[in-house]
């Protein structure tokens, strides 16, 4: 681990700058000519209610997808070398690797995996992360300066819900060029700076991922040539949830991930309500909401990304004020 060699000569902040620069450079170079094993988008289909094949993601046809496999590997490698390791961090890295691999396998599949399979996989990994957190941390939380103790079992249930929800709302928002990556960069930087004193070395994880995503955006900004796929978006959602839990302000996730909750989360809520009630709900509004803006209101993709980026900045600043 390079951290032990460098820490005697350099400050932690300088080491973090070096790590972030290496993560940025490696990601940019590796995505310049994506590996041949990465899948191409546009060849997938779903089965409609009449049993017919319906193509999905036609606008992204032919683009390299699943590049989250590449930048998550870069992130894990850089973090392993430049962040002070602990048993807890190593376990989280292993879980992120598993999250990335399952996402990549879905990206590579000719037919997208069913919701049940992905839901169960997400639930298992969320449960493992929740148990890991409680082994190494207390179940105390802070809300607007007040500390509350949450029973361990209750916290475990809430933590699983938070991680599972973060994975899925982040994934749902990855539907137009640059959106998920841009919002994630703002969120990671916000978390790292607002809670830098509490997070310690975990703030470094957020900043390294932010720089890696900036390099990815060089290829994903409209018009994109590469897509992160589930391998990237699901892993990003997982890391966001872990960092929010490590701040001891887990409910801060609501403000910090407001864009993802609004864009992707409302779609999940709509789907759940319709399945339970067997009735239409908000049937005139498309979800994820970026589809409403793009397809029903005629917004151009750069305008959508800018709108949600400003949206995210405002809520990150609000979280900074109340934390």
Image: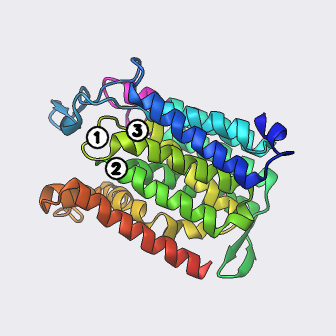
Q: Secondary structure at mark 2?
A: loop
Marks 3 and 1: in contact by CB < 8 Å?
A: no
Residue that badge 3 annotates: 228
Is disc 1 surrounded by few (<14), some (14 to 19) or many (20+) residues within 10 Å? some
Q: Secondary structure at mark 3?
A: loop
Q: Magenta includes 297? A: no
Name the residue: 59% across, 81% down.
Answer: 322
Q: Nearer the viewer, mark 1 or mark 3?
A: 1
Residue 187 vs 22, above or below: the answer is below
Numbered label attached to residue 178: 2
List x then y, in percent, for residue 110: 31, 23
Q: Is residue 159 left or right of residue 168?
A: right
Q: Which is more toward the observer, 136 or 187? A: 187
Name the residue: 68% across, 49% down.
Answer: 16
List x then y, in percent, for residue 258: 44, 67
Q: Is the magenta region chiefly helix, strand or loop? A: helix
Numbered range of the magenta stretch = 102-118
Residue 107: quarter of image: top left
Q: Is residue 76 left or right of residue 63?
A: right
Name the residue: 63% across, 53% down.
Answer: 242
The colour scheme applied to this rendered structure is: rainbow
Q: Secondary structure at mark 1?
A: loop
Residue that badge 1 annotates: 224
Q: Is residue 211 left or right of residue 4?
A: left
Marks 1 and 2: in contact by CB < 8 Å?
A: yes
Residue 144: quarter of image: bottom right
């Amino acid at each position: 681990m390079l951290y032990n060699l460098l820490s005697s000569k350099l400050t932690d902040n300088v080491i973090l700058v070096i790590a972030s620069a290496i993560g940025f450079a490696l990601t940019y170079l590796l995505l310049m000519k994506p590996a041949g094993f990465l899948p191409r988008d546009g060849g997938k289909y779903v089965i409609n209610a009449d049993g017919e094949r319906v193509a999905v993601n036609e606008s992204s046809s032919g683009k390299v997808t699943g590049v989250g496999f590449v930048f998550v590997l870069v992130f894990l490698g850089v973090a392993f070398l430049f962040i002070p390791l602990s048993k807890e961090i190593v376990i989280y890295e292993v879980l992120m690797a598993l999250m990335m691999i399952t996402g990549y396998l879905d990206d590579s599949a000719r037919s997208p995996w069913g919701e049940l399979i992905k839901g169960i996989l997400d639930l298992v990994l969320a449960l493992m992360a929740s148990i890991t957190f409680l082994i190494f941390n207390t179940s105390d939380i802070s809300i607007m300066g007040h500390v509350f103790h949450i029973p361990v079992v209750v916290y475990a249930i809430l933590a699983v819900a938070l991680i599972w929800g973060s994975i899925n709302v982040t994934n749902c928002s990855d539907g137009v060029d640059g959106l998920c990556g841009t919002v994630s960069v703002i969120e990671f930087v916000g978390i790292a700076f607002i809670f830098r004193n509490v997070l310690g070395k975990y703030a470094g994880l957020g900043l390294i991922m932010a720089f890696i995503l900036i390099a990815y955006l060089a290829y994903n900004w409209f018009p994109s040539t590469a897509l992160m796929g589930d391998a990237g978006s699901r892993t990003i959602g997982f890391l966001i949830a872990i960092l929010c839990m490590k701040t001891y302000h887990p409910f801060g996730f609501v403000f910090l991930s407001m864009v993802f909750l609004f864009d992707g989360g409302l779609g999940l809520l709509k789907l759940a309500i319709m399945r339970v009630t067997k009735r239409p709900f908000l049937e005139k509004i498309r979800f994820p909401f970026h589809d409403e803006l793009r397809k029903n209101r005629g917004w151009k993709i750069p305008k959508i990304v800018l709108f949600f980026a400003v949206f995210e900045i405002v809520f990150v600043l609000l979280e900074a004020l109340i934390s």
